[in-house]
């Protein structure tokens, strides 16, 4: 392919241009075998520091998740900060937050695949993994919230002894259906494009890794029918999972919006939640890409400033859209003049949680807009890490304001109360630790870079001389 | 009948491998007797091969219909068996059906697309197969059978077209 510096000179192009293009992964190809080696090395070479962090996370999970949850099960939900009128506290905040994080994988991978955005190629899997692991955390939060977790199976539609099947009029059942669909679909969607990379890993492994990859790659070789079926199935998934992604967070928003509570009964909640999920999800991808790039060997070749630049632009647009929805959701009740709606708005912006409300606006609007407008800053990975963390803090706070803070103010003033979480805090830390642990372990077991997709993209990118300019072009080989 | 063997020709680039496919056709190897194995997907148009059909879209549509029927049962069948009146709503509500119907249709669609991939691709399959690890390094392999007498003829032809290796292979455990 005419993508290298030599091909520029053969075209008689100025010497400066090849350097400009080679900063792009698609125009800086390396032999497939070398890329395979780089990815395999990143999986196999593990430092003592890595295992130190793993041990720390395991201990954190044992204490903050297993221990605290066990204590809560033994003592009952009274050990939480939940009481009338806040029946939904940080458990549901965390659930909404993690489902939001899970939107990144589908959005980045499926939508960009459908739109044929080539820049997606090296980081789709990193984002898809976030979807699966984020949904695991969300499911854990739901079960923690149940209290009597052993009765969780009542959600599953089956003819029970009391002759009452789950009530499918209830938004909570819609939630169960939507999240279950999303968990199953996103796991399959993660696995399918992984098959050729598992086959690559199988060809380059020995011992237990060979057995693992041999089993997981299902005997894939790369024959024409295998590729045809794989591409067809991936195409169906890419189109089908996008509306499912939108439906999941819309249905989550209906858990709130279907009630008549002040602050919740809003027709705009569906898209408002979806856009918030995309904002936190894309920001989380920036965090994960920074961690992969800076802690794993050879990843600087695959994850480049151009990818942070792209995600930064996407975050800026989504942050602006979030601000638009937030303003809509604020303005209409404020203008409407409903007594309890106005009391709630006043409580949020001037009450004891006003500092949280202001922090949310700073994290979701002020800081992202101040940083992400600048191309140079968008291409600075550590700054994008900071921005990603700030946005996720802001989005977690947004859910905190929507759920427990809004629950403080009801139409029965004698029940008004300020929510103070207790055991919910270690449990929240536990879900974060579990997410990180799962991701770290996965990074050592499955290729985080879809090498075949990178090579496919590189083989489709060429440079074409038009007049005196050399123009990047993409051939549609599908 | 003459003894036959399976030959595998390995190419680094797609263009010479496509020319080699044409050459093999000229030398009497039919399309259905030729297997192309590659580290990245190439469409049949690129390889100049007959278009492959896949049953996955039809299976997926069938799965979506099954999901829809399951949703119909859940949303209309359950209240029929166990009526549950919810404040002011009909016993057989239509709007919730749209939600449950959508979710289960999509689950059926994607679930059967995945199963279709396994069925149509005959995966998982762990028996010995013809394969060389260089394929996952981005090489393109052309695999076909020929008689022992023709071996050198094919080797010469494919080597002259840019094949890095042309050698007899046998099925091995992957």
Image (spheres, coloured by chain):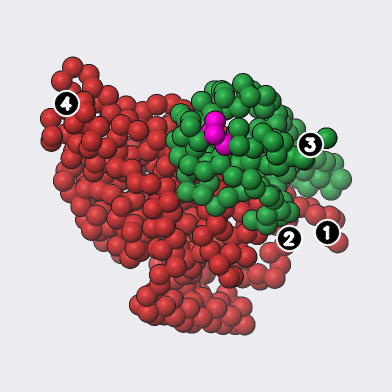
Q: What residue is at 23 percent from the left and 36 percent from the top?
A: A6
* Labels 1 and 3 positioned on one and the same chain: no
Looking at the magenta stretch, what is its main secondary structure? helix
As measured in the structure, the alpha-carbon distance from the residue carrying label 1 to the one carrying label 3 is 68 Å
x then y, percent, for residue A140: 56, 65
Q: Nearer the viewer, residue A279 or A303?
A: A303
Nearer-the-camera pick, A398 or A61? A61
Find disc 3 in the rendering and name its residue: B2
Subunit that carries the residue with mark 2 = A
Decide: few, some or many residues near mark 3? Use Cα within 10 Å; few <14, some 14-19, many ≥20: few
Q: In front: mark 1 or mark 4?
A: 4
Residue sitting at x 44%, y 60%: A40
Query: In the displayed structure, would residue A139 be above or below residue A266?
Result: below
- Marks 2 and 1 sit apart, C-alpha to C-alpha, by 8 Å
Q: In which quarter of the image is the N terminus of chain A?
A: top left
| Residue assigned mark 1 | A160
Q: Are marks 4 and 3 on the same chain?
A: no
Instruction: Give the chain coloured green.
Output: B
Between label 4 and label 3, give the one nearer the viewer: 3
The residues colored magenta run B154-158
| Chain A shade | red
- The residue depicted at 21 percent of the width and 56 percent of the height is A383
**Residue at which label 2 appears:** A154
**Decide: marks 2, 1 in contact (CB < 8 A)?**
yes
Q: In this rendering, which labeled residue sits more in front, label 4 or label 2? A: 4
Residue identifier under label 4: A12
Are dots 1 and 4 in contact, CB under 8 Å? no
Evaluate if marks 1 and 3 touch, with contact meaning CB atoms under 8 Å apart: no
- Indicate whether A137 appears above or below A71: above
Mark 3, chain letter?
B
């Amino acid at each position: 392919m005419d993508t290298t510096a030599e091909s520029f000179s053969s075209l008689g192009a100025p010497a400066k241009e090849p350097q400009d293009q080679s900063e792009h992964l698609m125009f800086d190809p390396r032999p497939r075998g070398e890329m395979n080696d780089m990815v395999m090395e990143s999986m196999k070479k593990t430092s003592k520091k890595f295992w130190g962090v793993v041990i720390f996370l395991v201990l954190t999970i044992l204490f903050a998740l297993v221990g605290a949850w066990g204590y809560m099960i033994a003592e009952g939900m009274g050990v939480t900060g939940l009481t009338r009128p806040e029946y939904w506290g940080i458990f549901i905040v965390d659930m909404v937050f993690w489902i939001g994080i899970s939107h990144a994988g589908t959005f980045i991978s499926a939508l960009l695949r459908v739109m044929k955005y080539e820049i997606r190629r090296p980081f789709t899997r990193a984002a898809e993994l976030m979807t699966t692991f984020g949904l695991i955390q969300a499911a854990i939060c739901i079960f923690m919230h149940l209290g009597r977790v052993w009765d969780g199976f009542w959600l599953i539609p089956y003819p029970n002894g009391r002759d009452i099947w789950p009530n499918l009029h209830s938004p909570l059942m819609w939630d169960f259906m939507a999240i279950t669909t999303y968990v199953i679909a996103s796991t399959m969607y993660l696995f399918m494009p992984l098959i050729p990379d598992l086959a690559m890993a199988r060809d380059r492994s020995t011992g237990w890794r060979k057995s693992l990859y041999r089993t997981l790659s299902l005997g894939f070789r790369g024959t024409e029918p295998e590729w045809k079926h794989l591409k067809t199935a991936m195409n169906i998934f890419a189109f089908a999972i996008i509306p499912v992604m939108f439906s999941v967070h819309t249905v989550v928003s209906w858990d709130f919006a279907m009630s008549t509570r002040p602050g919740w009964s809003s027709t705009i909640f569906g898209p408002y939640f979806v856009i918030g999920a995309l904002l936190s999800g894309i920001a989380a991808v920036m965090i994960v890409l920074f961690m992969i790039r800076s802690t794993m060997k050879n990843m600087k070749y695959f994850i480049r400033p151009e990818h942070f630049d792209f995600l930064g632009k996407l975050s800026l647009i989504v942050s602006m859209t979030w601000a638009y929805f937030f303003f809509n959701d604020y303005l209409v009740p404020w203008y409407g003049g409903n007594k309890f709606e106005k009391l709630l708005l006043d409580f949020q912006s001037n009450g004891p949680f006003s500092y949280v409300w202001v922090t949310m606006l700073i994290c979701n609007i002020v800081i992202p807009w101040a940083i992400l407008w600048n191309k140079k800053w968008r291409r600075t990975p550590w700054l994008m890490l900071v921005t990603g963390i700030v946005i996720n803090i802001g989005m977690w706070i947004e859910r905190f304001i929507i759920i427990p803070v809004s629950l403080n103010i009801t139409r029965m003033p004698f029940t008004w109360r300020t929510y103070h979480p207790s055991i919910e805090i270690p449990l929240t830390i536990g879900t974060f630790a579990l997410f990180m642990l799962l991701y770290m372990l996965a990074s050592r077991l499955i290729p985080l870079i879809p090498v075949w997709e990178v090579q496919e993209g590189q083989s489709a990118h060429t440079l074409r001389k038009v007049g005196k300019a050399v123009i990047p072009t993409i051939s549609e080989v599908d | 009948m003459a003894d036959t063997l399976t030959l595998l020709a390995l190419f680094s680039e797609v263009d010479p491998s496509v020319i080699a496919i044409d050459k093999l056709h000229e030398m009497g190897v039919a399309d259905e007797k030729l297997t192309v194995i590659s580290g990245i997907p190439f469409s049949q148009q690129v390889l100049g091969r007959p278009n492959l059909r896949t049953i996955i879209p039809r299976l997926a549509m069938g799965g979506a219909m099954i999901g829809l029927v399951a949703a119909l049962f859940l949303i209309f069948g359950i209240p029929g068996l166990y009526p549950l009146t919810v404040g002011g709503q009909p016993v057989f509500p239509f709007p919730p059906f749209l939600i449950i119907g959508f979710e289960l249709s999509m689950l059926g669609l994607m679930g059967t697309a995945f199963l279709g991939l396994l069925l149509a691709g005959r995966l998982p399959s762990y028996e010995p197969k013809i394969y060389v690890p260089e394929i996952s390094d981005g090489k393109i392999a052309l695999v076909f059978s020929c008689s022992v007498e023709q071996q050198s003829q094919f080797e010469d032809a494919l080597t002259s077209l840019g094949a890095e290796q042309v050698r007899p292979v046998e099925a091995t455990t992957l």
